[in-house]
Amino acid sequence: MTKKLKNPRAAGGFNLIELVIVIASAAILTLTVGVFLGNGQKSWNHLFNRVYGDMAIDSFTAHKVFDSICRKASLRKYVIEDEGQTLELYYWDSGSSALTPENYARFYSVDNVLYVRHGKLQAGTWQPDTSTALTPINIANNVESIKFETQGTSIRMFLAYTGENTMPVVCSTVRHND
């Protein structure tokens, strides 16, 4: 009786080289998926910060404050000083029937912060009432530069923020009151 030797390949298993090739292929595929997921998360974080970060919130706030004051501002007078870096607008109280505005708002930047300061005007004049103490309101931080310009009844505010990957913001609105 002679025993037949079985063919090792016929046994149906894997040899060591085939196993190493399968493990290496799985590792390469896993690393590729990991790199894509890592880049996707990095891009998601970058986009999320651009939409919901501090600078986006400051830009939205600055635009809303600027727009709400400009819309009720007088067409007759405004003051732009410091080569376009300071804007002073004059506006009425709601429901007022006065011939001249009762209030003013001054937009300016100090130490990379955009402020607005509201105050009262002397009755019947365009002069600020100096008897009341004014508190500046912080509108936006990290403001590298600010510039105001007018054309007709519209006023534009250009904000440039500090930082490498920051986009400038332009707010434009129209004064409505005579």
Image (cartoon, rainbow, N blue to C red):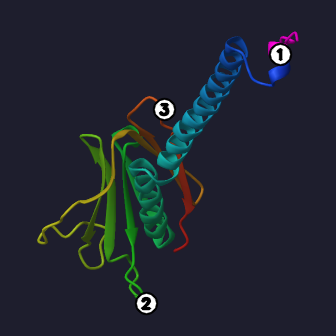
Q: CA distance from mark 3 to mark 1?
A: 61 Å
Q: Residue furthest front?
A: 1
The secondary element bearing badge 1 is classed as: helix
Which amino acid type corresponds to the residue marked 3 in the rendered image?
Asn
Residue closest to the eye, 161 or 176: 161
The secondary element bearing badge 2 is classed as: loop
Q: Please give the range of residues in magenta.
A: 1-9
| Residue position for label 3 | 165
User: Dot 3: few (<14), some (14–19), or many (≥20) neighbours within 10 Å?
Assistant: few
Identify the image quadrant of residue 103: bottom left
* Rendered image: mark on residue 9: 1
Answer with mark 3 or mark 1, whichever residue precedes in sequence. 1
| Residue position for label 2 | 95
User: Does the segment drawn in magenta span residue 139?
Assistant: no
Q: CA distance from mark 2 to mark 3?
A: 44 Å
Query: From where the camera sits, is residue 149 visible?
Result: no
Instruction: Residue 128: give x, y in percent of width and height.
Output: 23, 66
Instruction: Residue 93: give x, y in percent of width and height.
Output: 37, 82
Which amino acid type corresponds to the residue marked 1 in the rendered image?
Arg
Answer with mark 2 or mark 1, whichever residue precedes in sequence. 1
Tell me the residue at 40%/32% (across/down).
Answer: 163
Which amino acid type corresponds to the residue marked 2 in the rendered image?
Gly
